[in-house]
Amino acid sequence: MVITRFAPSPTGDPHIGNIRTALFGYLFAKKNKGRFLLRIEDTDQKRLNQASINIVKEALRWLEIIPENINKPMIQSQRLEIYHKAAFELVEKDMAYICTCSEERLKEVRACQKALGKPPGYDSHCRKKTFTLAATRLDELPEGTVIRMKLPENKTIEFNDLVRGKISVNTSTLDDSVILKSDGFPTYHLAAVVDDHEMKISHVIRAEEWLPSTPKHVFLHRAFGWEPPEFAHLPVILGPNKGKLSKRDGATGILEYKKMGYLPDALINFMILLGWNPKDDKELFVSPSQIAIGGTSLMMLEKLFKIEYVNKSPAVFDIGKLNHFNEFYLKCKTPKQLQELIKDFDIPDLSIPEGKLLERGGFKTLKEMAEYIKALRQTPKYPKELLVFKKSTPEATQKGLKAAAEKLEKISDPSWKQDNLQKALEETVKEQNLSNGDVFWPVRVALSGAEKSPSPVELLVTLKKEESINRIKKAL
Ligand code: GLU
């Protein structure tokens, strides 16, 4: 049975990179009819931010990347006793040891290593000390005591990474990391290994930054006598200039994107391409007709996803792509779906016409669309010359507007619909012996006050009867 997990450290708002890890773990589990679980890695009490746990959950719910235990995730800070026992079990097996080095000594060691140009790491000072205290608990030992893993000397640790293939590391390049801290909390290494085993995680899917820790994890699994899970490390995400991804580029909290009016479909589509592609040129995973009947990019990816298609090379964050996807998914929404979505943006009593107001607007986000509609609601200001189409005259324009207003006034509220409105304007042109530019143009400008805007009929539907007539009269 495939079981994957998302194991965030609640230290701040999860960003796209964090949630990408969740997405890949989720998709791999779904594709293999497996399970996807959540674990909160809150063992670093100094960096802990409680609010962040709720933000993670909210983000996962919003994007529908839902771990089956989302309401009751495994929480590491509630399991200290288990890690404590596990650490002492390893001491007993001579796979870990007690270390009493002071913070000062460690600092000196680091300074020395730096001066000699050596990589920083623990110098194994306490490794050879046989601790005479028959302690089974950390609190029975001097303050500041920690437990460290005891890596074998000069041995090769091997494991298979599903993205990178076989990886071997010699232990001479690794140092004995702390597994239990003096405050009684485990380090990430110990807690992750103990929990991955307990949760029966079959595949650890996580960001590449954890690849250097993996040999230590493999060692720990084996030290306990467990078979390590499979690993897959997702490529680094770089900023648009191929440098580190910065706040400005996209390392902002994922829910910020919600506030900016991005759709889950667009974000899922964007995140999956950060390190994966379906090996054809396809970039969009759901069609407009599928969306109209409730299909999502996530549903499609649940079928398409293949771990073999994860890339080794870094992914590049390109906000332009996200905007492009969002524009596409916005266009695919039916007026009814849009009406629901735009509610979050505080626009009362909105009617979106069946004709696609959006297509012309080319809105990138729901927020842009909402702001446009809000602006539309304010009486427009424009120079009166704008009312006259370049092939028209002030007289013809006035005639067109007047006739249009009279015709529109006769349409009742329930009949105020796209088809009827279109017909009314066309009839005005005919009956008055005018051209389209004498009617459609000035009506559109009267309603929008802008040189470019959606069509007059779309505006009439959006603004409704009373407001539309008022604006046309004002123009007259
Ligand atoms: N807590 C780690 C993080 O937030 C998870 C590492 C892992 O998945 O093993 O990145």
Image (cartoon, grey):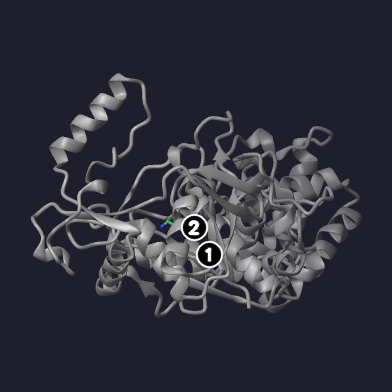
Q: Is residue 321 visible?
A: yes
Residue that appears at 44% across and 75% down: 198
User: Which residue is identified by label 2?
Assistant: 218
In the rendered view, does 208 fall on the left or right side of 423? left
Identify residue type, mark 1.
Answer: Pro
Looking at the rendered image, the quarter that the N terminus falls into is: bottom right
Read off the residue under disc 1: 228
Q: Under tag 2, what secondary structure?
A: helix
Above-or-below relation of 385 to 278: above
SS for tag 1? loop
Q: Which mark is residue 340?
A: none
Q: Residue at x 64, y 51 (%)?
A: 270
Q: Earlier in the sequence, mark 2 or mark 1?
A: 2
Q: Residue 476, can we see it?
A: no
Q: Position of residue 370 (x, y in %)?
A: 55, 56
Question: In the figure, 117 relative to 224: above or below?
Answer: above
Q: Disc 2 vs disc 1: Cβ atoms closer than 8 Å?
A: yes
Q: Look at 46% across and 36% down and name the residue there.
A: 246
Q: CA distance from mark 2 to mark 1?
A: 6 Å
Q: Position of residue 352 (x, y in %)?
A: 66, 65
